[in-house]
Image (cartoon, helix red, strand yellow):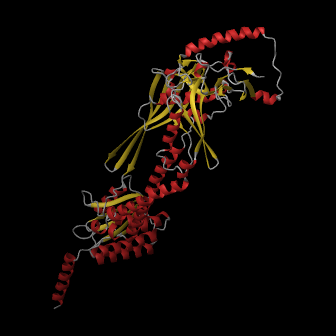
């Protein structure tokens, strides 16, 4: 069951190569040599061709492993090309590090044929930037328990290329509303209110380009949504050369399963776009809404995310940072005694001020 | 001597006729055109009205008709007041309650000293607290009795220099004071609680940042929105009218150009 996997090695010293988010190139931390992504890709394509030729001449076969069917369905075993150790991974793992020699390793088979991503956005921010962003995330949070700052420790920090589906589409909408315009004027001792009722119709088209939906069950949807948007100007054709040094998963949620979520977002934006063209009515009620989404093509992309885990009082806290823009999100614990202290601290002095105003200033 | 006495008596009579203004109306102070009251009831009420007129030099009258002949009850009451010579003395001081029973119309008008004794607030209270509730229950004799007795009290207060008005209406001032106190307490406690709630909720929201996206606005390219049709069609118009209550009123009486004040309505 062990499959051949690849790690990119320095052509000069055979040390492991890492993709540098700063330079956008592959770097060797042993001899400090720097290589263009395209040059290494070309080199390894030639290597793969030679290996394939050699393989055709070999006549040995691997011994079958004795995993149960269920285990076999969810696990994969690979041999580390640096130290030979066997790596047991999840069936969706596409890039990881060897726990023995710590060399970054990618699993090309995960991206073979139709599973190959169309695009990748390379990491622009490194691990230190993620740690700094997390420290900054704690700042200015009035309800954060003090002990959380001192007692919580980052358990794990991982740079992950998360699989996303990018949906193109176009909505066609026909929405009708009932609106009112209200005028009031005083005539002698009467207030005369005139209410004009209108029937409003808006029809329009809205194009959507690359609406993302994360395609990994391991990644919480809310976290992945909240770190949007990505700057698609950095979208590059996929190459495994961007993966060394980071983890990567292949998708395990089909594009069809994300359609409902994406449609809902497109519908909501379409409704807002049409409503923004309706003038200033005093009241506006939607009478009917007919929105059809014309589905376009779907692309498969790996987008960079830093995931951080902290533990506090036995509870896990998960933070995600957009590896390109640096937007960091994650729920924090709430100190309810602080909450009520703030509530009382604001309301009680205000009550005293209002009492003085009401009973001694205005009321006199 | 006998002749002298006759002359003296005639002189006294003539003097009294000139010096003491007498009831000059062509109708009774309590005039019932449709027999709504019994003879005794009408007689009792007339006695009471006459007693008020004698004590206060002021006519408090009741006119009960079948209808107001298609007129505005307030205007019709003024017509009757002038046509049948109601009102005491030169300035025609008086208060009249007119009823048109067919459509259950009423009008209350004051003239002369009536505009001093029966302020706008006073007339409202007289009708709303004492007369209309009984009229609505068809308790006419009780309603007219209450009307005459309360009017007597209003006149007494006016003669003492303190006409019944907002500032002398204990029930009204107590109720207003209570209302004001509750409003002030409400503002004092509720406004700070709402402000503190909004601020602390904003703090709470800062702690919860992992929220799903509801829209896809960021993925609409420039020029990606095309409006195909836009129509706003007028359907119909509603007009509502609301009488504005003058809350700044500190009392007093609104008198029209002909020297009357009052109000009308249905019971």
- The quarter of the picture where residue B85 lies is bottom left
In this image, B45 relative to B5: left or right?
right
Q: Residue at x 48, y 63 (%)?
A: B136
| Location of residue A261 in the rendering, given as x and y in whole percent from the top left corner | 61, 30
| Total residue callouts | 0
| Location of residue A212 in the rendering, given as x and y in whole percent from the top left corner | 57, 26
In this image, A186 relative to B238: left or right?
left
- The quarter of the picture where residue B63 lies is bottom left
- Viewer-nearest residue: A45 or A203: A45
In this image, A240 relative to A138: left or right?
right
| Location of residue B13 in the rendering, given as x and y in whole percent from the top left corner | 21, 80
Residue B222 versus residue A134 in the image, above or below: above
- Viewer-nearest residue: A286 or B133: A286
Residue A315 versus residue A113 in the image, above or below: below
| Location of residue A155 in the rendering, given as x and y in whole percent from the top left corner | 61, 41
Q: Residue at x 68, y 30 (%)?
A: A100
Q: Residue at x 25, y 58 (%)?
A: B258
In this image, A339 relative to B161: left or right?
right
Residue A347 versus residue A174 in the image, above or below: below
- The quarter of the picture where residue A359 lies is bottom left
> Can the viewer see residue B102?
no
User: Quadrant where the N terminus of chain B lies?
Assistant: bottom left
> Can the viewer see residue B196?
yes
- Viewer-nearest residue: A106 or B216: A106
């Amino acid at each position: 069951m062990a499959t051949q996997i690849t790690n990119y090695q320095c052509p000069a010293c055979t040390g492991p190569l890492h993709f540098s988010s700063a330079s956008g190139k592959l770097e060797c931390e042993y001899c400090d040599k720097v290589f263009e992504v395209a040059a290494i890709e070309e080199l390894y394509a030639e290597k793969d061709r030679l290996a394939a030729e050699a393989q055709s001449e070999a006549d040995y076969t691997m011994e079958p492993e004795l995993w149960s069917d269920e285990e076999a369905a969810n696990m994969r075993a690979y041999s580390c090309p640096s130290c030979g150790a066997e790596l047991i991974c999840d069936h969706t793992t596409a890039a990881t590090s060897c726990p023995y020699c710590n060399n970054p390793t990618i699993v090309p088979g995960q991206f073979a044929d139709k599973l190959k991503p169309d695009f990748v956005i390379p990491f622009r921010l490194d691990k230190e930037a993620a740690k700094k962003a997390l420290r900054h995330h704690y700042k200015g949070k009035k309800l954060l328990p003090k002990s959380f700052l001192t007692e919580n420790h980052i358990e794990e920090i991982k740079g992950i290329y998360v699989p996303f589906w990018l949906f193109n589409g176009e909505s066609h909408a026909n929405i009708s509303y009932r609106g009112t315009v209200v005028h009031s004027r005083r005539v002698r001792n009467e207030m005369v209110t005139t209410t004009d009722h209108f029937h409003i119709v808006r029809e329009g088209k809205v194009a959507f380009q690359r609406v993302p939906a994360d395609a990994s069950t391991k990644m919480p949807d809310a976290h992945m949504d909240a770190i949007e948007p990505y700057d698609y100007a950095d979208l590059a054709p996929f190459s495994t050369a961007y993966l060394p040094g980071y983890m990567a998963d292949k998708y395990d949620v089909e594009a069809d399963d994300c359609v409902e979520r994406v449609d809902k977002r497109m519908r909501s934006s379409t409704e807002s776009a049409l409503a923004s063209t309706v003038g200033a009515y005093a009241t506006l009620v939607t009478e009917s809404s007919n929105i059809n989404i014309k589905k376009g093509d779907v692309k498969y992309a790996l987008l960079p995310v830093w995931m951080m885990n902290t533990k506090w009082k036995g509870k896990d806290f998960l933070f995600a940072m957009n590896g390109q823009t640096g937007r960091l999100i994650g729920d924090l614990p709430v100190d309810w005694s602080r909450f009520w202290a703030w509530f009382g601290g604001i309301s009680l002095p205000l009550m005293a001020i209002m009492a003085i105003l009401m009973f001694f200033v205005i009321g006199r | 001597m006998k002749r002298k006495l006759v002359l003296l008596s005639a002189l006294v009579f003539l003097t009294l006729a000139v010096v003491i203004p007498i009831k000059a109306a062509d109708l009774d102070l309590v005039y019932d055109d449709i027999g709504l009251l019994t003879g005794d009831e009408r007689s009792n009420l007339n006695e009471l009205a006459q007693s008020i007129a004698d004590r206060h030099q002021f006519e408090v009258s009741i006119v009960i008709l079948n209808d107001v002949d298609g007129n505005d009850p307030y205007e019709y009451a003024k017509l009757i007041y002038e046509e049948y010579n109601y009102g005491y003395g030169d300035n025609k001081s008086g208060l009249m309650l007119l009823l048109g029973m067919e459509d259950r119309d009423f009008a209350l008008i004051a003239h002369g000293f009536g505009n001093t004794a029966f302020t706008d607030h006073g007339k409202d209270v007289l009708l709303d607290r004492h007369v209309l509730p009984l009229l609505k229950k068809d308790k006419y004799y009780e309603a007219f009795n209450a009307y005459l007795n309360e009017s007597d009290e209003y006149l007494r207060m006016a003669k003492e220099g303190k006409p019944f008005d907002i500032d002398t209406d204990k029930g009204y001032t107590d109720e207003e004071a209570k209302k004001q106190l509750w409003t002030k307490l409400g503002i004092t406690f509720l406004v700070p609680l709402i402000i503190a709630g909004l601020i602390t909720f904003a703090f709470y929201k800062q702690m919860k940042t992992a929220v799903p996206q509801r829209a896809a606005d960021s993925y609409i390219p420039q020029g990606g929105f095309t409006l195909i049709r836009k129509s706003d069609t007028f359907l119909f118009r509603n007009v509502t009218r609301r009488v504005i209550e003058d809350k700044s009123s500190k009392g007093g009486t609104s008198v029209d150009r002909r020297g009357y004040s009052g109000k009308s309505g249905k019971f």
